[in-house]
Amino acid sequence: MITPYQPSERTPQVSARRKRRLGDLLIEAKLISPNQLADALIHQQNHGGRLGSSLVTLGFLTEQALESNLAK
């Protein structure tokens, strides 16, 4: 059973060794909602591939927005 997306309880400061999760970054940037992330995670689980591709396929994010956030 898939549980609804729960934001990470990590502190805002992340050490250089710990990477931030893409979904958390996109929600913090207000580019997607938690519900959109949950839908994309279900899509990813059902169809495979990467989360960013699922977000673009579902129309929640443009490729340009994805690429600019991955570059950060």
Image (spheres, rainbow, N blue to C red):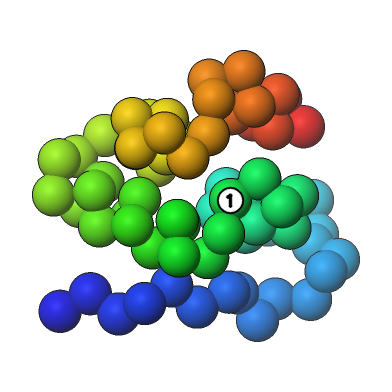
- Image coordinates of residue 34 in percent, x first then y, are 52, 65
Q: Which residue is mark 1?
A: 32
Looking at this rendering, what residue extends furthest in the front direction?
Answer: 59
Residue in the image at 36% along x and 77% along y:
4
In the image, residue 54 above or below residue 15: above
* For residue 62, side relative to residue 12 (left or right): left
* For residue 16, side relative to residue 10 (left or right): right
Residue 21 found in image quarter: bottom right
In the image, residue 24 above or below residue 10: above
Identity of the amino acid at label 1?
Ile
Compare residues 32 and 69 and report the one nearer the observer: 32
Asked whether the viewer can see residue 11, the reply is yes
- Image coordinates of residue 31 in percent, x first then y, are 66, 45
Q: Secondary structure at mark 1?
A: loop
Compare residues 11 and 59 and report the one nearer the observer: 59
Residue in the image at 53% along x and 34% along y:
61
